[in-house]
Amino acid sequence: DEAINGTNSLYVFGHASSSNSITFSSKEDFSKIHTILIENEDNLSDTHISTYSLSMALISNTGMRVGALSTFTSGSNLVSIYDITFDESLELTSTLLAQTELSSSSEYFELELFDEGEKVIVSNTTEDLVTILSGTNFLESTDIEIGSAPKGIALGFIGTDSSETAFIINSDDHSVTQLDLSDNTIIQVYEILAPNPTSIVLDENDAIIMVKSSFEFDEDDTISTITLLEI
């Protein structure tokens, strides 16, 4: 579940990765429900397998943008971008803004909207890079090589005059890459001592990143650790 705070209302949505539906409701009136069905618009017979990463960005006082990363039985990996708006009566409507196909030979882990919902960054664990989608219908694609097997992504602003920054976990390298999203340059790489880091959270106020790592201790037990890094 994720939530986003708008000027007029707080919207929440629920989703299970195996489901091709995303459900939205207004916290002011939970009877106002709207559901999106994620489909391959170029091949409606293509069966949805999983939507395993979602991201939201507030784009106005009466709307948000939602990004979804999905895979289908044809092998297609699709990024779907929806605009969700509501009127004075809190009725919700959705519009499919764009659907972009990624490489079918790669495995992806996470996507995040940034630049006020005008761009998307996606981690590609197979090719050791992140892909940034932008432009009309998100068809402009820029690949940036980082560490080995990038997975979790955290976005934010560090410092009062800074541009938006991405922190990307490189799972096989046990590291985190700090990427300046204004010019797509790597600022710094941080070492993570714990094995198999996968997910990351950024505390912008205290300039700290929190990285979760998990590994099997034996056949029955998995150990998880949290690493804190000052930026």
Image: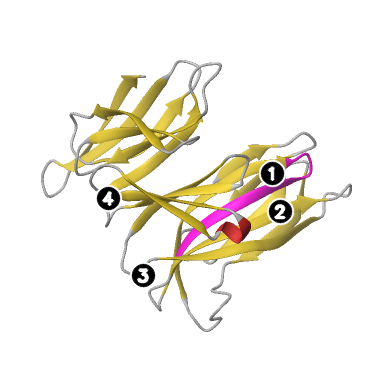
> Mark 2 or mark 3, which has the lower sequence index?
2
Q: Quadrant of the C terminus?
A: top left
Coordinates of residue 53 in the picture (x, y in percent)? 46, 53
Looking at the rendering, the stretch of residues picked out in magenta corresponds to 60-70
Give the residue displayed 24% in from the left and 34% down from the top.
175
Q: Mark 2 sits on what residue?
A: 84
Residue under label 4: 128
Q: Quadrant of residue 209?
A: top left
User: Does residue 222 appear in this view?
Assistant: no
Residue 67: in magenta span: yes
- For label 3, the residue is 104
Q: Secondary structure at mark 4?
A: loop
Residue drawn at (32%, 60%) of the image: 107
* Circles 1 and 2 in contact, beta carbons < 8 Å: yes
The furthest residue to the left? 218
The reply to whether residue 75 is visible in this rendering is yes
Give the alpha-carbon distance from disc 1 to disc 2, as whole Å.
10 Å
Q: Amino acid at mark 3?
A: Ser
Q: Position of residue 122 (x, y in %)?
A: 43, 51
| CA neighbours of label 1 inside 10 A, class few (<14), some (14 to 19), many (20+) | some
In terms of depth relative to the viewer, which is nearer, 193 or 20? Answer: 193
Q: Amino acid at mark 1?
A: Tyr
> Circle 2 — which element?
strand
* Mark 3 crowdedness (10 Å alpha carbons): few <14, some 14-19, many ≥20: some
